[in-house]
Image: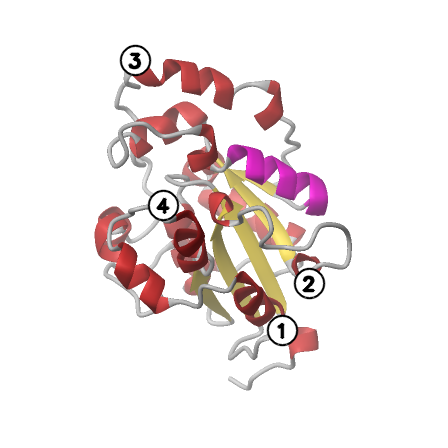
């Protein structure tokens, strides 16, 4: 496949919080013949600035540029080997100051989309890897701000699991792409495109071959200590969505 010019490339920024079916969605797009993927490109910059002790922290920081300006310049204008690039972003990785405020910034060159999930299911799943998550850990305020700044289709993970073909078809149409049946299933196992953090987080998706109905945290009860945080997640600051896919 010939390398397209940057002007013709479709660069999709999918903004998600943790435990939102985000890695399975990345697998789906990567299974398209016309698409390459980028896995959480701002993770190292986020860890370098915050100093947080995530699993495999030193390996993550060594694996990517830690200057957000360098990362974003490549995401918007770097060379591509395929006509489509899918960028899997965690919203909490986009810290204040990483992107200049106002119009004309680097994010304007991307086609934005937003992956959301019932916050009770997110919290139930995330609590298994972090005892006391915060609202900012889940990336919900950041996701709302990105949506209000850039717009774009909003996809509920529950809809993807319920009707993968129909939901992905609507998403592709909203992004200006043709739907590809190859997005519905993929080979099990790791990928060279996975971040170095995959051994800590991707066991479930590495065993998958498609969108399973029993997603992480799907039936487990929410720990009682997290109920106040759930109410904050469902508050007015984080519910100004209009579903467009």
Residue on which disc 4 sits: 211
The reply to whether dot 1 and dot 2 touch (C-beta < 8 Å) is yes
Alpha carbon separation for disc pair 1 and 4: 31 Å
Looking at the image, residue 14 sits to the left or right of residue 102; the answer is left
Q: Main secondary structure of the magenta part?
A: helix
**Span highlighted in magenta in the image:** 140-151
- Secondary structure of the residue carrying tag 3 is helix
- Viewer-nearest residue: 175 or 125: 125
Quadrant where the C terminus is found in the figure: top right
Alpha carbon separation for disc pair 1 and 3: 46 Å
Alpha carbon separation for disc pair 2 and 4: 30 Å
- Where residue 7 sits, quadrant-wise, is bottom right
x and y percent of residue 136 in the render? Answer: 47, 34
Looking at the image, residue 218 sits to the left or right of residue 153; the answer is left
Residue on which disc 1 sits: 77
x and y percent of residue 167 in the render? Answer: 53, 43
Q: Which mark is residue 224?
A: 3
Q: Earlier in the sequence, mark 1 or mark 3?
A: 1
- Viewer-nearest residue: 116 or 50: 50
Look at 23% across and 61% down and name the residue there. 189
Look at 36% across and 45% down and name the residue there. 211
Q: Earlier in the sequence, mark 2 or mark 4?
A: 2
- Secondary structure of the residue carrying tag 1 is helix
Q: Is residue 196 visible?
A: no
Q: Earlier in the sequence, mark 1 or mark 2?
A: 1
Q: Which mark is residue 109?
A: 2
Camera-nearest label, 4 or 3: 3
Does 143 appear in magenta? yes
Question: How does the figure colour the protein chain or chains?
Answer: secondary structure
Residues packed near mark 1 inside 10 Å, few (<14), some (14 to 19) or many (20 plus): some
């Amino acid at each position: 496949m010939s390398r397209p010019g940057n002007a013709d490339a479709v660069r999709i920024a999918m903004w998600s919080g943790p435990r939102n079916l985000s890695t399975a969605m990345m697998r789906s797009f990567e299974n398209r013949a016309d698409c390459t993927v980028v896995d959480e490109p701002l993770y190292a910059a986020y860890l370098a600035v915050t100093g947080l002790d995530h699993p495999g922290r030193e390996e993550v920081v060594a694996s990517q540029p830690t200057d957000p300006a360098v990362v974003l310049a490549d995401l918007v204008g770097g060379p591509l080997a395929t006509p489509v690039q899918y960028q899997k972003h965690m919203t909490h990785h986009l810290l204040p100051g990483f992107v200049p405020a106002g119009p004309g910034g680097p994010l304007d060159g991307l086609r934005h989309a937003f992956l959301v999930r019932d916050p009770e299911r997110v919290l139930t799943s995330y609590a298994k890897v972090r005892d006391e998550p915060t609202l900012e850990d889940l990336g919900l305020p950041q996701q709302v701000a990105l949506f209000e700044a850039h717009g774009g289709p909003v996809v509920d993970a529950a809809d993807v699991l319920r009707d993968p073909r129909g939901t992905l078809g609507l998403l592709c149409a909203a992004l200006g792409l043709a739907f590809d049946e190859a997005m519905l299933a993929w080979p099990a196992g790791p990928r060279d495109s996975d971040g170095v953090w995959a051994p800590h987080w991707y066991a479930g998706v590495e065993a998958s071959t498609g969108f399973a109905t029993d997603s992480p945290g799907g039936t487990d009860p929410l720990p009682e200590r997290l109920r106040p945080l759930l109410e904050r997640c469902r508050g007015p600051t984080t519910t100004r969505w209009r579903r467009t896919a």
